[in-house]
Amino acid sequence: MTNPLRGGRGRPLHPVLVHFPVALYPASLLFDWLSYLTDDGTPYVKGAYALIVAALVVSVAVAITGFADFLTIENGSRTWRLAFTHLTVMLVTTGLFVASALLRRRDLDVTSTPFGLLALDAFAVALLAFGAVLGHDLVFRHGQRVEAEPPAPGGQEQQAPGLGSDLSRP
């Protein structure tokens, strides 16, 4: 039986959902930076908070679908270790943004984001980028959630573009 959290055949959910937090978290950092460039950056401070909260909401679905994919990987394999590292990095990143949101919530009427929060978010965005690279490696180096094209008429198999023989390595 197909797990609905993993998506349909050839249509995984996790890679589709990750684009939202991967875009929203850095956008919140941009809003924080913009709050320093204006005389009254309060709208940017509030906007950064809203972006973080929206990303956290989507991150719940991202984490659930990612964990559903993680459970299908052979325990102890090289791919599993990479996936576990990816999972850990992304959970730490999410935790940092939860902390940022909680700290921001107390004081949304400031004229610019406090430097400590800016530094926290910059570190979290850097960690997010590292985690995204690990996720990229899971797909493109380890072939996770990649399905070959069905055989073409006439019995000739087609190989998906960019996918080489390194998919068969453990």
Image: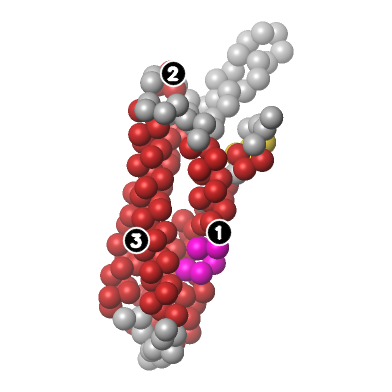
In the rendered view, tell whether residue 101 sits above or below residue 56. Answer: below
| Label whose residue precedes the other's in the sequence (2 or 3) | 3
User: At 70% across and 8% down in the image, what residue appears?
Assistant: 154
Label 2: element kind? helix
Q: Is residue 157 visible?
A: yes
Q: Which mark is residue 168?
A: 2
| Mark 1 nearby-residue class (10 Å; few <14, some 14–19, many ≥20) | some
* Vertical arrangement, residue 46 with respect to residue 98, above or below: below
Apparent side of residue 79 relative to residue 147 in the rendered image (left or right): left
For the N terminus, which image quadrant?
top right
How far is the residue under mark 2 from the one under mark 3?
A: 34 Å
- Indicate the amino acid at tag 1: Val
Residue that badge 3 annotates: 124
Assign the C terminus to one quadrant of the image: top left
Q: Is residue 26 visible from the viewing direction of this image?
A: no
Q: State which quadrant residue 159 falls in.
A: top right
> Which residue is rendered at x = 51% and y = 57% of the image?
59
Q: Is residue 116 left or right of residue 166?
A: left
**Residue 44 higher or lower than 169, as above or below:** below
Q: Which residue is mark 1?
A: 58
Give the residues in magenta.
52-58
In this orientation, which residue lies closer to the viewer: 53 or 45?
53
